[in-house]
Image (tube, rainbow, N blue to C red):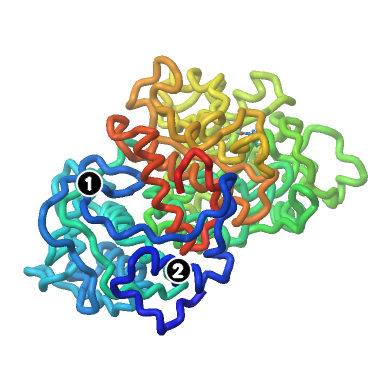
Amino acid sequence: MMIPHGVRMNRLSTARLAAALTLACSVAACNPVQSPRGPIPLVMPPPLTTLGAHRLVPTPVSVTPDDGAPFVLTATTAIVVPVGGGEASRVGGMLAALLRPASGFVLPVAAGDGAPPRGAIVVRLGGPASLGPEGYELTVSADSVRIVAVEPAGLFHGVQTFRQLLPAGIEGQHHAVRMASAWTVPPGRIVDRPRFAWRGAMLDVARHFFTVYEVKQYIDLLAMYKMNTLHLHLSDDQGWRIQIDSWPKLTTVGGITEVGGGPGGFYTKDEYAELVRFAGQRFITIVPEIDMPGHTHAAIASYPELGCSKPTPATQTGTAGSYTGTEVGWSTLCPDKDVTYRFVDDVVREISAMTPGAYFHVGGDEVQGLTAEQYASFVERTQEIVYKYGKTMVGWEEVGKARLRPTSIAQQWKSDSALLALRQGAKLIASPAPKAYLDMKYTPTTELGLDWAGLVELRTAYDWDPVTYLPGVAEQSVIGVEAPLWTETVQNITAAQYMTVPRLPAIAEVGWSPASERSWDGFRARIAAHAPRWRLLGINFYPSPQVDW
Ligand code: IFG
């Protein structure tokens, strides 16, 4: 949607601005969102007048408003980055790229370590060690903005906060929303850092395949909310989604379909590398998951020798199609064959070689076809392979039934085996299905999603604590939170966004903000101000009736 150039929005009142946007909002991005209480028009909230009234998500550790005039982004604003290039300089460039389209300003990025020019936005490494690797300090005054952090990741998070403090119209990246003099940010200081180190989302690209372009849109959503981990569920009964040179049929046979019989797909190594690069630019770590020994029919359909049952003529040629239904728990690699561990070794080796992140997720969930001893033995042998290739093992909580190395991590989902892992000294990723599973329906009438873990409306996804959710868990035993999106019923990015937004920002706040700063009433008021941003960004979302959008 292009706002007619004649409509210069200098000091437009909100009403006239809304009228102008309504006038020009002829495309989907601005069409009123249908909510149970009728259409929600796209109205831009007025610029913030005090930092204390911020609508930041996740809410920061500390916000100190100042008196005085606001900072104004203008045609002469420059972005000052450290001399010598590097990551901090790149973050300054990403800030400029975020602000240029809607403001129409040049926003030059200049290297300089001295006193910055008046009106500059300064992005600089420094600040107290107490900020940690992801924290930042954001100081706003009438004649300057300073984003300071110990590490570049912290600068990037400071940029996301600054972005949210500007009027929502700044997200009009595709709509050239011209608001010449409305780009104000009230003065004050924010000091912020995350509570948990692992703040993630999981995208199941096995049940339904998601293109590189779609995954990048998902990554941008995570970056907006300071999440730093994307767990890709790359294999399951219905599909194998990553090229493995030493076992080519995994994709040529195992990658060619999906739930419902669609065309499926897979990432070539180059495409996986592109996702790793794109995520890394946003300080997001890709965690690959090859689910084993269960959820492995696509691999066994490709190489029947990996299964225990006698191959039938149909499977001997490896042409048996992958499974396109949604039953779980019935498949398993054969734990008593050497070929199985040659397979595991090759797969872990090839994927680890192209994964800069520290983690390899081995799955381990829902295995009905093995004895407890067979399962434990498989997990222990697989664990050794993962560490041999320099990665730390992550597994769904059932891996706690095997002997774990103390650095291995268990991902809580049903919560009935999580304590087994904890008792071995493993850390926990909190993703309890009744709170964090984004494929759960919001309400009984939600068309997409499942409901085996219960209904998860926005407040359910927000109002919980990863440490107190289970009894007897210590704060330092929880490495963080993750919101899994299983895609049995979710076929594309638009549907994924509907199931993800606004619950993912809720989980992002659970993972980032101090428990003392969190409240449902506070969150529901703040998240309401994000809808215009999502609309301008073309992000589909569920307009929960629990929020006054
Ligand atoms: N449980 C299965 C997933 C998926 C999910 C759907 C885990 C760890 C139910 N395993 O969640 O494969 O089918 O909600």
Q: Residue at x 61, y 40 (%)?
A: 439
State the residue position of label 2: 19
**Precedes in sequence: disc 1 or disc 2:** 2
Say which element carries label 2: helix
State the residue position of label 1: 52
Say which element carries label 1: helix
Q: Position of residue 433 (x, y in %)?
A: 56, 31
Assess disc 1: are there few (<14), some (14-19) or many (≥20) residues with their C-alpha within 10 Å of its C-alpha. Answer: some
Q: Nearer the viewer, mark 1 or mark 2?
A: 2
Residue most extreme to the top: 472
Q: Position of residue 391 (x, y in %)?
A: 45, 42
Question: Looking at the picture, does residue 469 appear above or below residue 10?
Answer: above
Question: Looking at the picture, does residue 479 appear above or below residue 43?
Answer: above
Picture quadrant where residue 377 is located: top right
Figure label count: 2
Q: Residue at x 24, y 53 (%)?
A: 151
Assess disc 2: are there few (<14), some (14-19) or many (≥20) residues with their C-alpha within 10 Å of its C-alpha. Answer: some
Q: Residue at x 51, y 49 (%)?
A: 352
* Residue kind at label 1, given as amino acid type: Gly
Image position of 301 (left or right of 113): right
Q: Position of residue 405 (x, y in %)?
A: 45, 27
Indicate the quadrant of ligand 1 in the picture: top right
Near-viewer residue (4 or 246): 4
Picture quadrant where residue 454 is located: top right
As drawn, the label of residue 213 is: none
Picture quadrant where residue 100 is located: bottom left
Q: Is the shortest distance between ligand 1 and the CB of mark 2 under 8 Å?
A: no
* Residue kind at label 2, given as amino acid type: Ala
Question: Looking at the picture, does residue 127 appear above or below residue 325?
Answer: below
